[in-house]
Image (cartoon, rainbow, N blue to C red):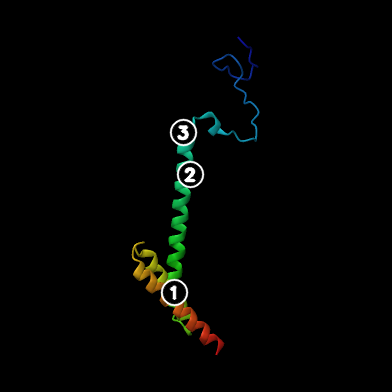
Amino acid sequence: MHACPKNQPRCAWGGSTRARPVSDAPIDLDKHRGISAQKATDIRRAIAEVEANATLLRERQSAVENELLSVPATCWPEAVAKARYVLNLYAASLAAADTRHRDLVASVLADLTRLCAETSTT
């Protein structure tokens, strides 16, 4: 049995309970686990990151929409920007097979771009 200093209590193995020096280097716990556990952790981390990004995107989108609702357009380019935003929202909600409506949205967006460019050059 190891002898402990007088002012130090004994621990179960007979040595001192004095703290050992702590290293500042992080320990990579993943290398001590199996591949499947590592993959599961990676998937959980990726899902958490995607959810956080989705939440941030929804918050930013809501802020943009609130601004679009509260501030009226003062010129045609601003009105076109609002219409473009709404049309892109609509196009994103369309089914992939709905090519007719996708083509219609693309045509309207092209018209808006062309007319806006013609207005700014005159």
Residue at label 3?
Answer: 37
Circle 3 crowding by C-alpha within 10 Å: few under 14, some 14–19, many from 20: few
Task: Give the x, y percent position of residue 5.
Answer: 65, 17
Say whether disc 3 or disc 2 marks the residue closer to the N-terminus: 3
Indicate the quadrant where residue 97 lies.
bottom left
Q: In this view, does 95 lie above or below 119?
A: above
Q: How far apart are marks 3 and 2 (CA)?
A: 12 Å
Q: Distance between the residues labelled 1 and 2?
A: 35 Å
Residue at label 1?
Answer: 84
Task: Give the x, y percent position of residue 112.
Answer: 45, 80
Residue at label 2?
Answer: 45
Q: Which residue lies furthest to the bottom in this view?
A: 122
**Which of these two is toward me, 99 or 92?**
99
Locate the C terminus and report the quarter of the image it occupies.
bottom right
Circle 1 crowding by C-alpha within 10 Å: few under 14, some 14–19, many from 20: some
Residue 38 left/right relative to 93:
right
Q: Which residue is drawn at 46% across and 53% down?
A: 52
Task: Give the x, y percent position of residue 29.
Answer: 54, 32
Q: How far apart are marks 1 and 3 (CA)?
A: 46 Å
Whether residue 40 can be seen here: yes
Residue 23 left/right relative to 74:
right
**Amino acid residing under circle 3:** Ala
Q: Residue at x 59, y 33 (%)?
A: 27
Task: Assess whether mark 2 and mark 3 are in contact (beta carbons under 8 angstroms).
Answer: no
